[in-house]
Image (tube, rainbow, N blue to C red):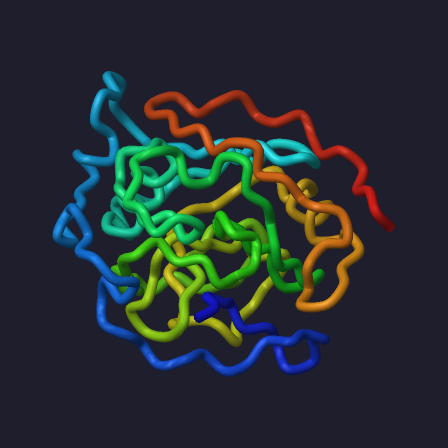
Amino acid sequence: MEAKAEPPAKATSSASAPLPAEPAYVDGGADPTGGNFTLADATAGMTSRGPLFATIKTSLGDLRCKLFDDKAPITVANFVGLARGERPWKDPKTGAWVKRPAYDGTTFHRVIKGFMIQGGDPTGTGRGEPGFTFPDEMWGAKHDKPGLLCMANRGPNTNGMQFFITDAKTPHIDRSYTIFGECSPVDTVHALAAVRTGPLDKPVQPLEIRTVEITRGAAPPKPSGSTPPTGR
């Protein structure tokens, strides 16, 4: 089943209504963590302390994302663990549980200008799942600006590995998707969202997520800006 963020009614999209939630660990075989994966597990081996950041390095420039581990600790733990290769996930291509960086070499597979860019699926189809789910963490934040880092889902409490970044205010999805970070520069988000797309909102030319680098402490250097979008 496909994890999605739902577009506004006026957007041209193939999206359907969110599907009902399913039990955790639906993909066969037990989660090696038993569903108990903490921020301490996710940051194992990191010697620095302080705020957590994710640098999402894309084919159109880097995004520096401040993670809200104080507001959404479960979500941040799973995202950081997947990015660093500390959180086991079930490879949808092989069915094997693996511990390796989940996002490196993937793409933003679904892009809707004026709404969001969605990625984090190793299959690039929107149907890839990590073999586990975890609950929503709604903490009162609103989807009131571009650059917000959020989890995609199939309904309440079905978060896994796919995420999206808002390209604009999206109040119609408030209280439906966990916000767990904020990314800049917004110009790079807009550039990613502006590429030409085909069926299922898939970019005509792949938007690569080359790596997701997790750091802690001082903010990483501010990205210099985006590369002009291609494929238009």
Where does residue 153 sit, x and y in percent of width and height? 41, 66
Residue at point 62%, 59% (across, down): 110
Residue 141, quarter of picture: bottom left
Q: Which of 163 and 180 is in front in this view?
A: 163
Residue displayed at 34% across by 61% down: 159
Looking at the image, which is closer to me, 217 or 192?
192
Q: Position of residue 152 (x, y in %)?
A: 44, 62
Q: Residue at x 56, y 49 (%)?
A: 147
Q: In this view, does 157 lie to the left or right of 126?
A: left
- The extreme top residue here reads 47
Front in this rendered view, residue 66 or 76: 76
Q: Quadrant of the N terminus?
A: bottom left
Residue 124 seen by the camera: yes
Instruction: Name, please, the residue furthest toward the front.
Output: 94
Badge count: 0
From the viewer's perspective, tell me whether residue 232 is left or right of residue 220.
Answer: right
Q: In percent of the image, x 37 and y 61: which residue is there?
A: 178
Is 95 drawn above or below residue 198 in the view shown? above
Q: Check the image and report above or below for 93 versus 221.
A: below
Looking at the picture, how far across and down is residue 135, in whole percent? Answer: 25, 63
Residue 165, visible in the rendered structure = no
Q: Is residue 200 left or right of residue 198?
A: left
Along the viewing direction, whichever of 116 and 144 lies nearer the viewer:
116
Which residue is outermost to the right? Answer: 232
Q: Where is residue 62 in the image (x, y as percent from the top left)?
A: 60, 32
